[in-house]
Every structure is written in C-alpha cells, then in structure tokens.
C-alpha cells in the first residue's frame, strides 16, 4: 500500500477521492472496461474531466490503478486478520476462506470490481491484470505456508506435492464459484453452501494426506 499511497490521487480530499474510486469501480464492475466511459464516471462522481485526467492520464491508467488499489486493500486487511498461530494448513485455509467471506461484505464495491476484472477480456488491460494477479497469488501463497506443521502429513508422501494439491484444489473450488456478472449480493446468498462444500473438500484432503 505504501507504493500506492504515493500516487497523486492521494493528494485529493478524502471524501472526494473515496467517491471517485467507488464510482469508478462500480461502473467498471457493471459495464466492463470498454463500455464504461469517463463521462459517466465524472458525472456521478461530480468532478471535471480535466481533474480526472490530472490524476489519471488515461482510462487504462485509472483501471489498472483501481485493480492494484482494490487487491492491495483486501490483502492488507486479510493479512492482518490471518491466524498464523494455526499450524494445521487445512484449518488455516478454512479460516482464510471464512475470512474472505467476511471481507466481501466489508468491501462490496471492491470485491465486485475485482471479480469483474478477473473476467475482463479487453487486451488493453487484461494482460496487466493477469500479470498482477499471478504475482499476488505467488506472494500470498508464501504467507499462507509460513510455519505450517509438516508432521501432520503421512510420511510416505512428497510433502511439497501434497501441499500443492491442497492449495490448487481449494483455489480451484473458489474460482469455480465465480462467474461473469456475478455480484457480491449473489455470492452472499450461497455462503452456507460454500462453507459446507469447502468442509467436504477439506475432509477428503485430510483423509487422503494426514496421518
């Protein structure tokens, strides 16, 4: 976040900045990159086009900043609340899954925007979004795996491959629940099912790989 806060948008008065960022994310989440115009953003945010382009030289600059800002905001809060005292990787991942569900309600506009950005196909922004997403996944994986108890695993398995199977299975489940145009209000209706199914996957993984 420190790098982001050096962006000149943070010289804008707090209330105006928050309105601009929220409106921009909402418009992009609803309409996608190509169909969203800067005219509709400035109209709802009640700022001039000149001011918008003073802070963001192009629509692409605005979009890519918003994605980095959104992901960083979520992950910063996520890392603060992660229970790193839990050494059982399956229990830790379950707690992380539940924390993610909680954060969707804390940052609805951000999650709607990030969810839509993962499905963005416009090559003007999609390559940069994909590159940044991959970097964030690899970085978060390092945090997730810190100080886990390897003694819980069966000794005749390749532990690193087992951990990879666990991470990609649960990540794959999460990604399978996402779909283009789906908003936080849609995900909220399915929280109980998500928790039930993630517990079922964790039980299978525990039986397969734990002593």
Image (spheres, rainbow, N blue to C red):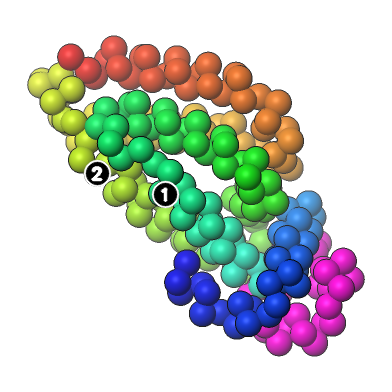
Q: Residue farthest to the left?
A: 155
Identify the residue shown where x is 50% and y is 36%: 99
In the image, is 3 to the left or to the right of 184? left
Res. 176 visible in picture: yes
Q: Quadrant of residue 155?
A: top left
Whether residue 1 is in magenta: the answer is no
In the image, is 135 to the left or to the right of 21? left
* Front-lying residue, 23 or 40: 23
Crowding near pointer 1: few (<14 within 10 Å), some, many (20+)?
few
Q: Quarter holding the C terminus?
A: top left
In the image, is 185 to the left or to the right of 9? right
Callout 2 secondary element: loop
Q: Position of residue 45 (x, y in %)?
A: 83, 69
**Which mark, by number, is residue 80?**
1
The mark nearer the N terminus, 2 or 1, is 1
Characterize the magenta stretch by its predominant secondary structure.
helix
Q: Position of residue 16 (x, y in %)?
A: 75, 72
Magenta segment range? Answer: 33-61
Res. 40 visible in picture: no
**Location of residue 66 with respect to 151 vertically, above or below:** below
Q: Position of residue 70 (x, y in %)?
A: 58, 58
User: How far, Cα to Cα, is label 2 from label 1?
Assistant: 14 Å
**Which mark, by number, is residue 146?**
2
Identify the residue shown where x is 54% and y is 64%: 68
In the image, is 199 to the left or to the right of 193? left
* Front-lying residue, 40 or 1: 1
Q: Disc 2 vs disc 1: which is toward the camera?
A: 1
Give the tally of numbered discs.
Answer: 2
């Amino acid at each position: 976040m420190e790098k982001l806060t050096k962006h000149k948008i943070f010289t804008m008065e707090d209330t105006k900045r928050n309105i601009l960022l929220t409106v921009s994310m909402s418009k992009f989440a609803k309409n996608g990159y190509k169909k969203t115009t800067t005219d509709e953003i400035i109209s709802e945010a009640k700022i001039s086009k000149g001011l918008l382009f003073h802070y963001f030289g192009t629509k692409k600059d605005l979009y890519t900043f918003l994605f980095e800002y959104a992901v960083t905001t979520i992950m910063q809060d996520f890392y603060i609340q992660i229970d790193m005292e839990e050494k059982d990787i399956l229990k830790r991942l379950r707690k992380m899954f539940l924390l993610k569900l909680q954060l969707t309600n804390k940052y609805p506009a951000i999650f709607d925007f990030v969810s839509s950005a993962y499905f963005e196909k416009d090559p003007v922004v999609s390559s940069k979004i994909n590159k940044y997403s991959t970097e964030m996944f690899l970085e978060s994986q390092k945090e997730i795996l810190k100080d886990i108890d390897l003694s819980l695993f069966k000794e005749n398995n390749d532990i690193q491959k087992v951990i990879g199977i666990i991470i990609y299975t649960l990540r794959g489940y999460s990604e399978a629940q996402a779909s283009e145009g789906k908003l936080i209000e849609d995900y909220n209706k399915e929280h109980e099912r998500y928790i039930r199914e993630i517990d079922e996957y964790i039980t299978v993984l525990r039986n397969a790989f734990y002593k």
